[in-house]
Amino acid sequence: MKTRNIHLGIIALLSAWMPFTAKAQDKVEASVGVDLVSGYVWRGQDLGGVSLQPAASVAYKGFSLEAWGSTGFSKTDADGYDAKEFDLTLGYSAGGFNVSITDYWYNTGTGYFHYGAHNTAHLYEARLGYDFGPVAVNWYTNFAGADGVKENGKRAYSSYISVAAPFKLGGLDWTAEVGATPWETDFYEAGGFAVCDVSLEASKEIRITRSFSLPLFAKVTWNPCSERAYFVAGFGF
């Protein structure tokens, strides 16, 4: 499939899903930013090289709406177009609990306004998760659109579960994560249950001036299912 991966890209894609605060906001909160990443790796999958990934979100009383995109710098198809992605996420969070629905769209398929069950480049995913503090657990399932299939050709309802644990070490912020798909789907190139993402990420703020700092990260990802490994880095504004 297409999307998402390295830390800043992932942060951009998942920011609307993470708890904003233990209490609902009393006022509207909005944010905008952009990440530059050396590679686009998402859930153990290589989705492209150097990419620019903008994000904008608005949140109120636990509800959030986020737009996220990715544009590659390399030509990736026969027509010479850059691969582009545009996602919209509607979410709700309260305490550690969070739920969301995401509409993913890629310009490598049909046009944006094609929503037919068998003629669309949109993919719809539901997410349910809980952040326990030391560990965050999230479950994702594709429920409509351009989902993967099983060997028999039937819709796979491709799903993914991740367990992530943040910690501090040596003055850096770290996150260790393991992700797996629970059943067969060609969406994750899995013939059944398979671990497809084992990653370790380090990040820090690089101070540029007294009032401005640059978030920088580096991340190593192993995909035991596809027997691939990646090392990417990036920063955001």
Image (spheres, rainbow, N blue to C red):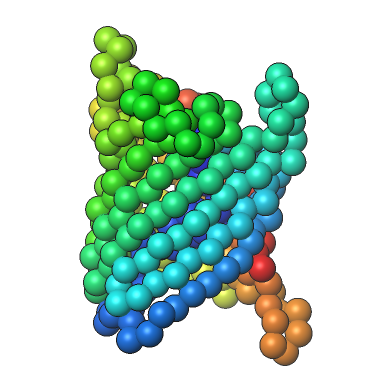
Residue 191 place in picture, x, y as percent: 32, 19
Q: Residue at x 63, y 61 (%)?
A: 34
Q: Is residue 133 visible?
A: no
Q: Residue furthest top?
A: 152
On the image, which quarter does residue 224 sit in?
top left
Q: Residue at x 62, y 53 (%)?
A: 53
Q: Residue furthest front?
A: 113
Q: Is residue 55 visible?
A: yes
- Residue 170 versus residue 8 in the image, above or below: below
Could you say which is closer to the camera, residue 106 or residue 182?
A: 106
Left or right of residue 221, residue 36 in this image: right
Left or right of residue 124, residue 231 in this image: right
- Quadrant of the frame with the C terminus: bottom right
Left or right of residue 43, residue 100 in this image: left
Residue 108 place in picture, x, y as percent: 58, 29
Residue 55 place in picture, x, y as percent: 56, 60
Could you say which is closer to the camera, residue 4 or residue 175?
A: 4
Q: Residue at x 29, y 46 (%)?
A: 126
On the image, which quarter does residue 151 sit in?
top left
Residue 134 place in picture, x, y as percent: 31, 67
Left or right of residue 90, residue 95 in this image: left
Q: Residue at x 75, y 79 (%)?
A: 208
